Amino acid sequence: MSQPPRRPRTLNDARTEAEAAFKKVTAKVAPPVPQRQAAVPGVKEQVTLRIDQDVLEYFQADGPGWQDRVNAALRKAAGK
């Protein structure tokens, strides 16, 4: 069987092939996303939360326990 004549290689062909080969070798596979474990009831997690000054003053006005009151208000707003 006769093969069709090869066309001459050009610089663009070589560059395209080199770039394709380079991408195959250097392509990074995304690491699997770790799954979050279900929250354990009663365990609290420390977070940073920005709230307006007047809202903070409202919850702090009744003294100690204001963080628990904020948590209860957020729980109610979340429907839990």
Image: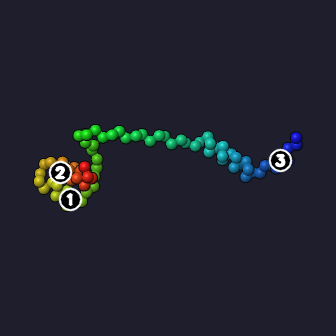
Q: CA distance from mark 2 to mark 3?
A: 79 Å
Mark 2 Cα-neighbour bin, 10 Å: few <14, some 14–19, many ≥20:
some
Cβ atoms under marks 3 and 1 closer than 8 Å:
no
Secondary structure of the residue carrying tag 2 is: helix
Secondary structure of the residue carrying tag 3 is: loop
Left or right of 6 on screen, residue 50: left
Q: Residue furthest right?
A: 2
**Residue 66 placed where, x, y %?**
16, 50
Indicate which disc residue 73 carries. none
The amino acid type of the residue labelled 3 equals Arg
Relative to residue 21, is residue 78 depicted above or below?
below
Relative to residue 76, is residue 40 depicted above or below?
above
Q: Quadrant of the N terminus?
A: top right
Secondary structure of the residue carrying tag 1 is: helix
Q: Residue at x 15, y 54 (%)?
A: 60
**Residue 45 placed where, x, y %?**
27, 43
Most foreground residue, 56 or 5: 5
The amino acid type of the residue labelled 1 equals Val
Residue receiving disc 1: 55
Indicate which disc residue 69 carries. 2
